[in-house]
Amino acid sequence: MSDSTAAPRLSPLHEQHVALGAAFTDFGGWQMPVRYTSDLAEHHAVRTAAGIFDISHMAEIAVMGEGAGAYLDEALAGRLSALAVGKAKYSLVLDEHGGIVDDLIVYRMTDHEFLVVANASNRDAVVTALTARTADHAVAIDDRTDATALIAVQGPAARAVLEATPGFVAPELDELKYYAWTTGTFADGETSVEVLVARTGYTGEDGFELYLDHHHAAALWQALLAVGEPLGLQPCGLAARDTLRLEAGMPLYGHELGTSIQPVQAGLGKVVVTAKESFVGKSAIEAGPGDDAHVLVGLAAEGKRAARAGYAVMSGDEKVGEITSGALSPTLGHPIAMAFVHPAHAAVGTTLDLDVRGSRIPATVVSLPFYKREA
């Protein structure tokens, strides 16, 4: 278990960030770069060219054994046994009350091995939940976080950056589908390092996430930056990652997701396969959260004043909801937010007010995502 009083953990790329002049923040128990130069410049780099992110704080947990697929069907919300080798799937860990313990990406590595990738702040909770659910299943759980580094390259030029990087080889990246993975290699000096190359991301852009042994992460990071600079690649911190994911309508644990929230409230009802015979939280999911349970919506406003997490959403003099994430959208040029509101006020086109430090800012309920890249 993690110690909340301990000093933040350092990424295997920490020295690289220091050399680049990054500003740091504590995130999920890790000291991670929040920005290098400008939040806006980093955000726009991802939308127009490419950004490189250190996301080594994410947790990587292997599930192994002949019963791994059936086990994950019961342990998680989705039907992972149907996932093909070489593919990935978004899923959820639920508790007995149907609340969200964490959201995950699950990769099928072989017939009998899966890789579960969880959020940094929920590493212990997910390992505990997965371990507790192994009863009657022939599986083993192996937390590989400490040995794994994770680098994301995101944006329209992401594939060009990877293909131009000396020493990096991955087969047919142009053919790799979204939420699929392949095995690549990287030559760190005389050592050939295996790299899991996944076409996944958290920005709303095309891109890749690269998993490799943490000892070789610095060499790959440096190689990517060196070749990517002429292509517009910039190192990006958590601030840009947050505005990018918000524009893309992607939830963040602790904001749009939590144990007090059922998937259907957060627009994730389709992630849960209720047709399965059993899974943790099934009874609560089938019962539902109640008719008055607040639901997640997108809100768009005019002007430049953005509502932040915790700000009230009003209808007349009545508080009908609360902002979970909000920002002045760098891409769209106007304020956007996600909020949980009473279902009576959740229809697209509904006009509400955002209480921004005592001022009322008119906003309209809109469909998510706010931004979607061109195919």
Image: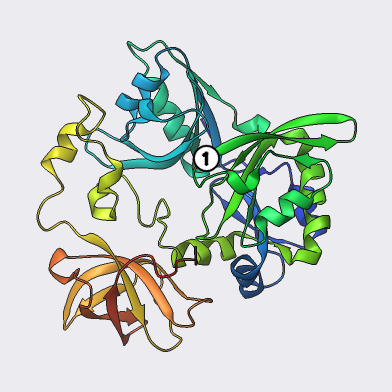
Classify 101 as above or below 204: above
Question: In the rendered image, which residue does mark 1 sit on?
Answer: 180
Q: Residue furthest right?
A: 190
Residue located at (42% from left, 57% from top):
250
Residue located at (59% from left, 28% from top):
144
Residue toward you, 326 or 49:
49
Q: What colouring style does the render use?
A: rainbow
**Does residue 306 appear in this view?**
no
- x and y percentages locating residue 320 in the rendered image: 19, 71
Quarter where residue 135 is shown? top left
- x and y percentages locating residue 113 in the rendered image: 50, 21
The amino acid beneath tag 1 is Ala
Residue located at (30% from left, 35% from top):
77
- x and y percentages locating residue 201 in the rendered image: 54, 51
Classify 43 as above or below 6: below
Say left or right for 197 vs 309: right
Classify 108 as above or below 44: above
